[in-house]
Amino acid sequence: MLPSLPRLVWLLLLCSWTAVAATAAPKPRTVVTTDGEVDDVDTFIRMLLYANEFDLEALVYSSSQWHYAGDGQGTRFTSEMPNTAKRYGERTELRWPGTDWMERYIDQYAEVYPTLKQHADGYPTPDYLKSIVRVGNIEFEGEMEKVTPGSEFIKQLLLDDEPGPLYLQIWGGTNTVARALKSIEEEYQGTPQWGQIYRKVSDKAVLYTVLDQDATYQKYVAPHWPEIRVFYNSDQFWSFAYLWPRVVPAELKTYLRGTWFAEHIKFDHGPLLASYFLWGDGQQIKGDPEHTHGQPDAGKQYGLQQYDFISEGDSPAYFFLLDVGLRSREDPSYGGWGGRMVPSPTNPRRWEDGPQVKDYNPYVDSAETTYPQTRWIDVIQNDFAARADWCVQSYEEANHAPTVSVKHALDLTAKPGQKLTLKGAAQDPDGDPVQFRWWQYQEAGTYPGNVTLLKPEQTQAAVTVPADAKPGQTIHLILEGTDGGSPALTRYQRVIVTVK
């Protein structure tokens, strides 16, 4: 939605653009499975503010090694995961937050929905969001024997004829998704349709998994569905999770401190964000006695202050789906707001982070495994703050991100020694000036050295392909545009130069 007064002016500008940007792709379809950990709840709250950016198809309660409901019959269970088994021993249930918490936050979303939808098209109605909530496999960690409403819903989505991938976000255990896949296998294996169904599901399903929080991927999914694509985040998510004080540089911690959250998120931004969990905020999750973060002095032993960030360890799973111009959904090795991953040496359909994926961290002058995610903290948090403003401010009062584009193809070829002219452009819906910066994302390309960009802070820059570049190597050049609004918002275009 554009501001009412200059609407005609902006429409004329939009029609006259000569800049070339990436072709608008359909919004990605996605399913969320969650075990209700405190960081899942905060991830869920933030995700609702971005619910216009993707097609939410299902919201499913599931279990994990940290949270399960039990069967109500006193059956005792010991975790298959060694650390959890040692920590909790034999249990009948574990820290279970119930199966109504998503609906409660959707009710709060309903209160800000009329204001949110003024700022962007595509926000789902609260009634629609409630209609896609299901209970999956929750009784025990890794339980996947029972067919559940959640597993059946996911099965139907995997078998439907809607085009494009279905991104399955695994915020807890993989068991409900595993049950859906097993139901497909049980129904079709041995039938004439099995080959076609296996290929369809393998090509359609994409798992974004934050750690393995039960054993069902290793025990069932990997051996039975080895061609399903998996994005496995085991290291990079920590910059948005509980260990952030250890891995985030001091210069970026400002965006995770209580002062920032109190000003931009927690207060005066409506009921949904008032419920966001922070250290020392006085809140307590029902059913989870270990959620003590809200107690006034709980963070002091860790050097944390009131309203400091707790964790959103699962947010990279949907950050990956946001189209901000970085093109990382084309190839996870490109890197973006959802991190950077490379193909597993044992399965090319599985992408992983870990010790083999490092970005240079200029704050500490070394390459680090978490920096592919950490490097985006400031722009991600500013974007969050703007969405928080959308909950309570009119379109004219709030800030909106610019559109960044280039006046040539996004994929270029050039010979060693050849000079290329890079031409960028931007339009800001609020009429704010846009500051540009061209930079090389060295780790995303296959050319191992640095390139020199001339006039990198202008719309038109230049780069010369190094003489030692080899045919087939790639150089990734990012055009970053940041507007002059408050909070300042950033979008990108990525130009990939392939050496010929």
Image: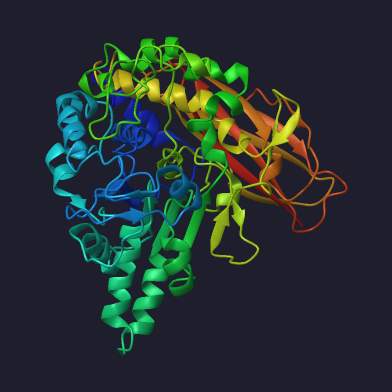
Q: Is residue 449 above or below residue 194?
A: above
Indicate the quadrant where residue 247 lies.
top right
Relative horizontal placement of residue 471, taking residue 76 as reference (left or right): right
In which quadrant is the C terminus drawn?
A: bottom right
Relative horizontal placement of residue 104, taking residue 158 as reference (left or right): left
Q: Residue furthest right?
A: 468
Instruction: Return the x and y of residue 50 as percentages of the image width and height.
Output: 33, 35
Instruction: Return the x and y of residue 215 as percentages of the image width and height.
Output: 44, 59
Instruction: Return the x and y of residue 463 as percentages of the image width and height.
Output: 75, 36
Relative horizontal placement of residue 156, taking residue 379 as reference (left or right): left
Asked whether residue 467 is in view, the answer is: yes
Residues 27 and 231: in front is 231
In which quadrant is the N terminus drawn?
A: top left
Indicate the quadrant where residue 206 lies.
bottom left
Residues 427 and 94: in front is 94
Q: Which residue is depicted at the point 48% across and 62% down? A: 229
Instruction: Return the x and y of residue 163 as percentages of the image width and height.
Output: 33, 63
Relative horizontal placement of residue 332, taking residue 449 as reference (left or right): left
Residues 441 and 75: in front is 75
